[in-house]
Image: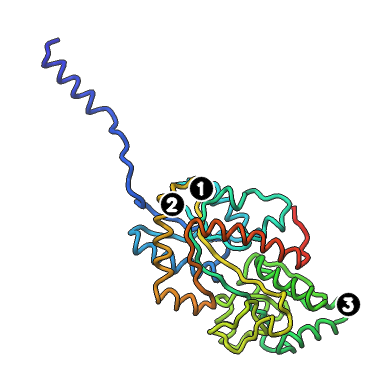
Amino acid sequence: MNMTTRILIALVLAAAMPLPAVAQPYPHKVIKMILPFPAGSATDGVSRYIGAELQKSLGQPVIIENLPGADGIIAAQAAKRAPADGYTLFVSTNSAHGANPAIYTTLPYDPEKDFEPVAGLIRIPQLMAVRKDFPADDVASFIKLAKERPAGKELTFGSGNTSSRVAAELVKVAGNIPMTEIPYKGTPQALQDLVGGQIDMFFVDPFAGMGLITGGKLKVLALTDTTRLPVLPNVPTMAEAGYKDVQVVSFAAVFAPAKTDPAIVERLNQEINRILQQPQTKAQIQKMGATTLELSPSEAKKFVSGEIVRWGKLVELAGIPKKN
C-alpha cells in the first residue's frame, strides 16, 4: 500500500468519526413551566403573563403545564424529576414551598434541597367571599350566623388550596365557630359551587374571584392582608374586622431542579426581574390584586426558608392535623 492510498484511507476514517459535541448557548429550545394549580388561579395568570414576556426576550417558546392536586405535591415531584438544564421550571407557592412540611408527615420532595430558587413573582392575599344573597354582609354577622346554626347544619367552606384552607381554619379558631370543610382540587370548582350555593364561604385570591365579584355574583367580607387593595378599596382587612390573627398572604416564585447551572439561574433571574420591574407588569399584577416580589436567587433562598417557618406557625395556629 503506497503513501497516497494510506492518506486517502486515513481521511475517509477521519470523516466517518463523530464530531465532538458543541455546547449550544442557553436557551436553544422550548422552556416548560410546571404549575401546581389549574387555569384560572393567580399563579396561572401571572405565569402565563411572565411566560409570554420571557418568550419575547429569550427567543424560545415558553409553555405552561398545569399539574394540580395534592397541595402541589404532584407538580413538585414532576419538577424534581426533570433534568437540571434550565428547560423545566417550577412555579411554586406557599403550599409546596411553605406549608406542606408542616402539613405532611412525609413528603416525596424536599422544598429546599431539591430545588434552586430562581426568582420571586408575586405576593397576594385571600378574599373572604360568599354568594351574593348570603345573609351576612361583614365578618361579624358571618360569625354570628355561624354560631346560631344548629348542630349538624354548620356553615361550610371550600378549600381549593393551602391558603384558602388555612385562612378558613383561622377564622374558625378566631371566631370560635364550627364550620365544615369541603375540599376541592382547585379554585375554579370551589368558586362554581360557591356561586351555586353548594358551599357557604370560600377564601379566594383576587385574580380568580374578581370577575365574579365585579359581576355581582359574589360579595367579599374582608381580605387577609394588613392593608386594603387598590382594586377593592371598600373591602376591609381582617384586622379591621377585629381578627388580626387571620393574616394569610400567599406567594408565587420560580424554581429550577437542584444542581441547575448557576449561570442559567442568574440569567433567568435577571430576565424575570426585568419583566417584574416594567411599569406595565406592575400595573397588570396590581389588577390581579397582587404585588410584585422581586428577589435575587440568594434572597429567594432566604425568603423560602422564612416562609416554611411562617406557614408552619400558621398551620399550627389553624389547628390543621398532619397528613400521611
* Label 3–label 1 contact, CB within 8 A: no
Q: Which of pointers 2 and 1 lies earlier in the amino acid sequence?
A: 1
Image coords of residue 108 (percent x, y):
65, 48
Who's the residue at 57% across and 87% down the image?
A: 233
* Label 3–label 2 contact, CB within 8 A: no
> Relative to the observer, which residue lies in front, 38 or 20?
20
**Disc 3/disc 2 C-alpha distance (Å):** 53 Å
Who's the residue at 70% across and 72% down the image?
A: 167
* Vertical comparison of 103 with 208: above or below: above
Q: Inspect the image, locate mark 2, and give the three-letter code of the amino acid beneath it.
A: Tyr
* Label 2–label 1 contact, CB within 8 A: yes
Q: Which mark is residue 82?
A: 1
Q: Which of pointers 3 and 1 lies earlier in the amino acid sequence?
A: 1
Q: Which residue is most to the right?
A: 151
Image coords of residue 306 (percent x, y):
62, 60
Residue 51 falls left or right of residue 199: left
Q: Inspect the image, locate mark 1, and give the three-letter code of the amino acid beneath it.
A: Ala
**Disc 2/disc 1 C-alpha distance (Å):** 9 Å
> Relative to the observer, which residue lies in front, 122 or 220?
122
Secondary structure, mark 2, is loop
The 10 Å Cα crowd at callout 1, few under 14, some 14 to 19, many 20 or more, is: some
Question: For the residues carrying marks 3 and 1, which lies nearer the camera in this image?
Answer: 1
Who's the residue at 70% across and 69% down the image?
A: 165
Q: Which residue is mark 2?
A: 87
Picture quadrant of residue 73: bottom right
> Relative to the observer, which residue lies in front, 80 or 133?
80
Secondary structure, mark 1, is loop
* Vertical comparison of 226 with 56: above or below: below
Secondary structure, mark 3, is loop
